């Protein structure tokens, strides 16, 4: 399993080539980089990978996630962005597209606002540019649930915020004990979750610096996303020159699972990837 030391930690990553043959070196062909949601690991993207025919995808676990290091301290968006920038440099990637989901979308905004060399296009999925009182209250409830009842307690509190109504109606098993326990097994350690949440809660308001983003940007919001409703996506699109917002109908925050084909189509259309 590939790991690389960057920014004084080890990051786990993997590269998928979906129906691509005769690949050129990493530095010569744009690669699509996925930035995970806050408690995810690379496996969370698996349903989407086969639908991105003709592309190469780099997935990685941020600090505190999956098989990456779990150092002490709060994992702020700026620190995650430092890690990602160092990963891109260490892998000698000179041309890439970046897709960030939720907290990964925040990280992607921070990095893109630095105008890093090589970034070609940006996709911001189900995310926010700021921590307002409502979002803070939601995430604080997760932090307290984690403190009082561990990972499964945190999952139970988060469940109604992240799944769309339509999906839960057709997949009620997602809210069952077996499903919650399975998700708990895939979650980061307790210490890592605490550090990830502490870092997220340092978020201020990124909108003033989003004017620095100069690459074509697509903002995608789930129509039924209660965690980061579409109004937050619209704020991002308004702040980034030339960006536009698209709504994904009938889905909540877990769009990779709730409507995999719809998400894949939106990505392919924006990146002009055949599929």
Image: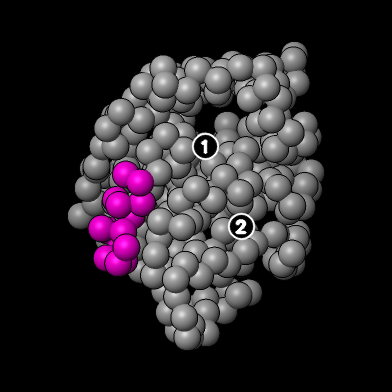
Mark before the other along the chain sequence, 2 or 1: 2
Q: Mark 1 points at which residue?
A: 203
Quarter occupied by the N terminus: bottom right
Name above or below for residue 4 compared with residue 100: below
Residue nearer the viewer, 209 or 225: 225
Q: What element carries label 2?
A: strand
Q: Determine the residue positioned at 78% across, 48% down.
A: 71
Q: Can residue 133 be seen in this view?
A: no
Percent x, y of residue 32: 45, 64
Quarter occupied by the C terminus: bottom left
Q: Give the range drawn in magenta.
A: 261-275
Name above or below for residue 158 compared with residue 80: above
Percent x, y of residue 65: 68, 46
Looking at the image, residue 177 sits to the left or right of residue 103; the answer is right
Q: Mark 2 points at which residue?
A: 60
Residue nearer the viewer, 65 or 114: 65
């Amino acid at each position: 399993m590939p790991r690389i030391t960057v920014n004084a930690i080890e990051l786990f990553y993997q590269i998928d080539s979906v129906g691509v043959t005769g690949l050129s070196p990493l530095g010569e062909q744009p690669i699509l980089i996925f930035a995970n949601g806050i408690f995810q690991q690379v496996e969370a993207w698996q349903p989407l990978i086969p639908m991105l025919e003709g592309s190469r995808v780099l997935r990685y676990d941020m600090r505190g996630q999956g098989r990456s290091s779990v150092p002490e301290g709060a994992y702020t968006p700026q620190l995650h962005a430092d890690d990602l920038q160092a990963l891109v440099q260490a892998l000698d990637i000179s041309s890439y597209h970046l897709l960030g989901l939720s907290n990964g979308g925040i990280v992607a905004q921070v990095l893109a606002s630095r105008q890093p060399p090589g970034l070609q296009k940006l996709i911001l999925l189900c995310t926010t540019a700021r921590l307002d009182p409502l979002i803070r209250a939601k995430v604080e409830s997760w932090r307290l649930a984690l403190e009082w009842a561990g990972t499964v307690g945190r999952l139970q509190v988060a469940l109604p915020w992240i799944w769309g109504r339509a999906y839960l109606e057709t997949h009620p098993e997602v809210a069952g004990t077996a499903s919650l326990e399975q998700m708990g097994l895939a979650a980061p350690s307790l210490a890592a979750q605490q550090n990830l949440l502490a870092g997220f809660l340092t978020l201020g308001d990124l909108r003033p610096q989003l004017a620095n983003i100069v690459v074509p940007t697509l903002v995608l919001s789930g129509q039924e996303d209660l965690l980061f409703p579409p109004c937050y996506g619209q704020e991002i699109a308004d702040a980034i020159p030339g960006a536009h917002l698209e709504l994904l109908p009938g889905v909540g925050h877990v769009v990779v699972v709730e409507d995999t084909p719809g998400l894949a189509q939106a990505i392919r259309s924006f990146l002009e990837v055949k599929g």
